[in-house]
Image: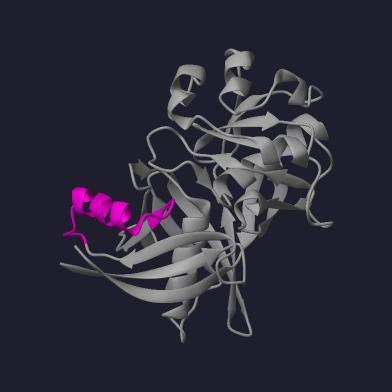
Amino acid sequence: MEVAYYRFDVFSQEPNKGNPAGVVYCDEGVSTEKMQQVAKVIGFSETIFILPSEIATFRLRFFSPGSEMPLCGHGTIAAVTLWCQSQSDKVLEELTVETIAGCLTIGVQIQSGTVQVTMKQAAPQFQPFEGDVNALVNNLGISVNDLDERYPIMYGSTGSWTLIVPVKGLAVMKKMQPNNQQFPEVLQNFPQASVHPICFESYHDDSLMHGRHFSGAGTGTIEDPVTGTASGVMGAYYYQFVTHNKSLPLKMNVEQGQEMGKDGQLSVLLERLADTLTISIQGQALLVSKELLKL
């Protein structure tokens, strides 16, 4: 069996930066097991399958090498970019995408051949971390003194749960060595959640926050270079726990991947619609190559 997939670098316009993703056009006859096999062989943090949908423009399924994921921000942007590039004469300014996490509204702008994708995320949710802080920092390779105690450690989700861990700066970020397989013992409320440390020191002058993203134990990966869904959570966290509900709308740049040599940056947009906080992420994806995979 041969499978064609498209390799994208997301949240960058420079090859081998940002976050790589594989995108596969798929039909309904392909089994979940086969999709998981393809994702494992491709080996990126996420591989995305584009399928037909009866309720949206198309449907997406997201697979890490180890399991299916409900949502993937950078994967969505890669898939939407590929779809737009194949629809040259009838690209929509707004489309809908069906996922396990729900139907997403996607905005598209094309300038000089570059596709700018704005992805609306699910309404943000937060729950306090009530676990063992010492065990948490031990599994990140840091100490309690490295935490930024001005801000709380919180579980957050805009489609996928992650643990936001505020730390004091880039030096702390750089020395982290995660023990992902121990995460479920520490993250007892959400055993399969990822861990997303943040700080307010950045490599880029126009970045408000810097993050790293350590994958959940069942994903088959250790670290994700640039994470769209978690960046949305960062934006909501900043609004709720740092600015304490600053006036909206609000737009910020966040960065990730520098410790891995993957310099990525994206924008997070916050606004209030009908008394609901709305989170969107905005970024671009670079098509690097089309590959043929033999299984």
Nearer to the camera, 176 or 9 = 176
Q: Is residue 221 above or below residue 8?
A: above
Percent position of residue 58, x then y? 37, 63
Above or below, 172 against 107 in this view is above
Q: Is residue 49 visible to us here?
A: yes
Tell whether 267 sits left or right of 38.
right
Q: Nearer the viewer, residue 258 or 286?
A: 258
x 62%, y 63%: residue: 283
Residue 212 position by quadrant: top right
Q: Is residue 37 magenta?
A: yes
Left-right relation of 205 to 22: right
The percent position of residue 282, horizontal first and vertical second, equals 64, 60
Q: Which residues are magenta?
A: 28-47
* Nearer-the-camera pick, 278 or 225: 225
Magenta stretch contains residue 265: no
Count of marks, rendered view:
0
Is residue 76 shown to the viewer in this render? no
Residue 43 located left or right of residue 229: left
Q: Quadrant of the C terminus?
A: bottom left
Left or right: 52 in relation to 125: left
At horizontal 62% and vertical 66% (from top left) the residue drawn is 12
Find residue 203 and report its horizontal and vertical position in percent.
78, 53
Tell me the residue at 77%/20% (across/down): 145
- Image coordinates for residue 206, horizontal then vertical, percent: 82, 57
